Image (spheres, helix red, strand yellow):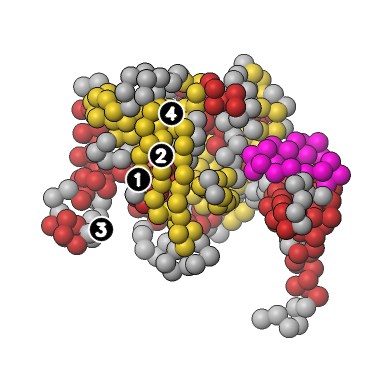
Amino acid sequence: MVMRMRSKGFERIGSHSHITGLGLKGKEAMPVGDGLVGQTEARKAAGIVVDMVKKGKFAGRAILLAGPPGTGKTAIAVGIAKELGRDVPFVSISGSEIYSSEMKKTEFLMQALRKAIGVRIHEMRKIYEGEVTKLDVQSVPHPYNPYQQIPKSATLALKTKDEEKEFRVDETFAQYLLQQNVEVGDVVQIDADSGRIVKLGKTEEAIKKEGIDLHTKEAVELPEGSIAKEKEFVYVLTLHELDVATSRRGSFFTIFFGGKEDITQETRQEVEEMVRKWVDDGKAEIIPGVLFIDEVHMLDIEAFAFLNRALESELAPIIILASNRGMARIRGTEIESPHGVPLDFIDRSLIITTRPYTKEEIRKILEIRMAEEKIKMEDDALEYLTEIGEKTSLRYAVQLMAPAHNIAGGNKKKKIGIEDIKEAEMLFADVKRSMKYLKEHEKIML
């Protein structure tokens, strides 16, 4: 995640923030589409999975994305979540994360699974609704880290077809705005009581102003009437958020001391019964999301047994695993298996393979990242960066863009030149150069 501060506020750029879907035309994958490049066979297969999920024919299965590092496995998982719908939860964890000393691994996995299941709730509330015409976040240095900026307050202007107002909000609400990635041009609904924010989309005028293709992004209409109104407020909570709220309800220790209440199986059953009643009464809808587990070979045999059981549950998200290993030992056993995954779990998985990118595909991906990060680059510099990506890795080439942009800015240049790329390359080593350096100096290394 890249976060830059400018006078107008924060600019948030994630590794996969440019991905809006799988880039499909019908059932075929376009060479470039929705922020994805290449991997047409893998994206077509992922599109079939999305279609199966929407038709309710994917129960009891998982997806295994297998391929070399840096071939877009996470990007495809994000694309699947985007294709399933705007409110679909996407939870990404690494296989090594489950071995936290603070939590049992089965509890960690259970929480991850329930974070990946959303509940869309419909409720009549007093809200503020309108298009964001101004967003100015005021920041101050972090009290414990002067090199880091944190929001202090924000000025937010909303407008409808009939009214326009400006609001001054505190640091908590400013943080909400950043977390929801609210930008000028977004149409938002804000709960007057809780401050919860729902992004409805961008207006057609805002989409055209940003130069986004209207065929790839759906526009929403500018709201009518006053900004403050009584309206059905639609928001999404995850099962885990409901578990936490229920476990803290009525707890003396939590109410007075802010302690953390353990989530019991009884609490989870209570939440599930409550959600089922909401669904039966037409007040809520369940949204199965995506749980993406990278480095799946790091899971042990107990974790796989737990996931096997989770796949059979009524309330189960889509589980997507990713591995860059061939044959590997299953952790906790002496058995070697493809991708370090037990054979019985592989039998329940659809395997999608990814391949290394071509030079042309690397160049196109770099162009997309340049547009996302609002970076300009000379043609010869882009060609040189593409060659770096081909020789080393796509990730390394993408990583060099930010320092090269910084170097060019220091030289008061609006575009990154080839000399800026070379300087960044000299200052920041790729893996092969780093390993070579370590080997040359291994005698003095610890």
Marks 4 and 1: in contact by CB < 8 Å? no
Which of pointers 1 and 4 lies earlier in the amino acid sequence? Answer: 4
**Frontmost residue, 53 versus 218:** 218
Majority secondary structure in the magenta region: helix
- Chain part drawn in magenta: 357-381
Q: Which mark is residue 260?
A: 3
Closer to the camera: disc 3 or disc 4?
A: 4
User: Is residue 49 at least partly visible in the picture?
Assistant: no
Give amino acid for label 2: Leu
Q: Whole-percent x and y of residue 320?
A: 52, 39
Which percent across, then down, holds residue 202? 49, 27
- Do the numbered discs 1 and 2 sit on residues whose CB atoms are within 8 Å? yes
Instruction: Determine if the magenta segment contains residue 243.
Output: no
Categorize mark 3 by other alpha carbons within 10 Å: few (<14), some (14-19), many (20+). few
Q: Nearer the viewer, mark 2 or mark 3?
A: 2
Q: Nearer the viewer, residue 106 or 196?
A: 196
Who is closer to the viewer here, 3 or 260? Answer: 3
Q: Is residue 336 left or right of residue 380?
A: left
| Precedes in sequence: disc 2 or disc 4 | 4
- Say which residue label 4 marks: 131
Relative vertical location of residue 45 with respect to residue 365 in this rendering, above or below: above
